[in-house]
Amino acid sequence: MHFAAAIETHPSMDASASTTRQRRQSQISATLNTDENLLTIKKTQQDALRHEISQIVLWRQPISTVSYAILEMIYLIHHNFRLFISYRKTLSLLCLLLLSSLFIYKSDGAHQSSIQTIERLIFWSLYWLGLGVASSIGLGTGLHTFLLYLGPFIARVTLAAYECDSVQFPRPPYPNEILCPSNNLSRSNDFLESGSVSFWTILWKVKLEAFFWGLGTALGELPPYFMARTARLGQAGDTDDEELREFEQLLLNAKLHNVRDLTLFERLRYSVYCLIQRIGFWGILLCASIPNPLFDLAGITCGYFLISFWRFFFATILGKAVIKMSIQTVFIIFLFSEHHVESIIRWMKHIPYYGRLLQTPFKDWLHEQKGKMHRTNDESTSGHLAKVSILSKLFNFFVAMMIVYFIISIINSLAQRYYKRKRAADCK
C-alpha cells in the first residue's frame, strides 16, 4: 500500500521540481535582463558625461577651462595639505631634518666645498629623475623625454669623447655644455675616465644620468598601481578613472567573448595581462625591460590583483632603470660612436631624389656640434658660432612646442577632473 502510494506520488514530485527549475530560470533571465538594462543605462550616461568632458578644452571653452583648472588646483592644494599635516610624527621628523640640514648648509667651514658638490649632484639627479617621471606620463603627448633630452645628451657626450679624445670635460660648463679639455687639465682620479676613449669609458660617463632617468620612469608607473589597488580594496568607492574602467571592460569582454573577437590593440593589452598573471615577477620584469607603451596595464594589473608593492616596484626598477636603460644607452653610444655618424651622413646622398637635400642639414649640425666643443671656457657661443644649423633650430622649436602642449594638456586635465567631480557631487 505505502509502496504503491509512493509510486503514484512520484510524477507529481517531478512536476513540482520541473516547475521550480523553470521558476528559477525565469528569475535568472529576468535578473540578467535587468542587469543588462542597468549596464546599458550606465554606459549611456558615461558616454554622455565623457562627451561633455571632452568639450572642456582651451580651444573650445577657454574661460570655463581656465576657471575650472584654477578651482581644481585650489582643491588639490587644500586636500593634499590636510593629508600631509595628518601625519604629525612624520611631519615633525621632516621639519627636524630640514632645520638640521639648513644649519649645516648655512654654517661656514671646510665642509662647504663638499656641500656644493653634493648640491650639484642632487639637483642634477632630480633633473633627470623628473624627466623620467615626465616620460612615463607621456609629456602630455605620449612622446618620450628620452628622445628629447637623454638621447641627445648621450649622443653629445659620445661625439665629444671621440672628437676630444677624452671624457674629462671641464666643469663648468659641463654638463650643460661640453668643451674639449685643455692639455694642462689635471688627470682624473677615476681610472674609468682616464686613458684612451672606449665604449666603456663613455658608458661610465653617462651612467648617472641614464640610471636616474630610468628610475624616474619607474616612479612614474606607481600611480596606476596605487589607483587600481585602492579601487580593488574598496577604499575609493566607485572609481571614475578611465584606464581602470577600460581594464575592467577588457577583462569582461575577454570572458564573455572569444579573444579573437577583440581588436588588435585589445589583444595586445590582454596578452600583457595574461603574461603577468602567469609568471608574476618575471612577467613584470620582461614588460619593463623592453620599450613597451602598454606597461601602464602592468601596473593596473598588479594593483588590481593585489600583487605585493615591493615585488612590482623592484621588478619595475630593475627592468626600466637597469636593463632597458642599458640597452637604450648602448644603442645611442654605438650609433654615435667614432665614424658611424659620418658614415650615415655620407650614405644619405645615395637616397633617391632627396639624398643631398637631407644630407646638408645633418652635415651642418655635425659641424656645429664639433665647433662648440673646441671653444674656450671664456669664449661666448654667439661669437664663435654665428650660424646655427637648421636641424638644431627645428629641434629647439619642436621641444618648445612639446612643452607648450604639455602645459595646455595639464590645464585641460585639471579642468576636466574638476568638472567630473562636480557632476558626481551633483548626482548624489
Image: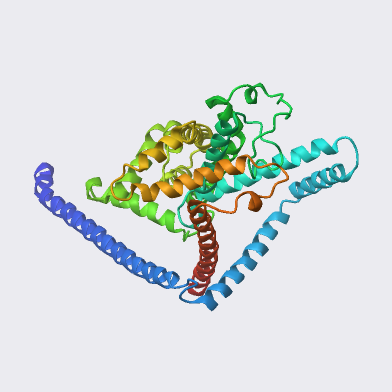
Q: Quadrant of residue 344?
A: top left
- Residue at position x 77%, y 46% from top? 94
Rendering coords of residue 351 (x, y %): 31, 44
* Residue nearer the viewer, 57 or 81: 57
Instruction: Give above or below for 415 relative to 126.
Output: below
* Residue nearer the viewer, 370 or 127: 370
In the figure, is residue 346 to the left or right of 389? left
Please identify the residue farthest to the right as the structure is shown: 108
In the figure, is residue 356 to the left or right of 185? left
Q: Which quadrant: the N terminus?
A: top left
- Residue at position x 33%, y 63% from top? 39
Rendering coords of residue 342 (x, y %): 44, 36
Instruction: Give above or below for 19 relative to 333.
Output: below
Q: How many marks?
A: 0
* Residue nearer the viewer, 114 or 99: 114
Rendering coords of residue 140 (x, y %): 49, 57
In the figure, is residue 198 to the left or right of 300? right
Rendering coords of residue 247 (x, y %): 39, 51
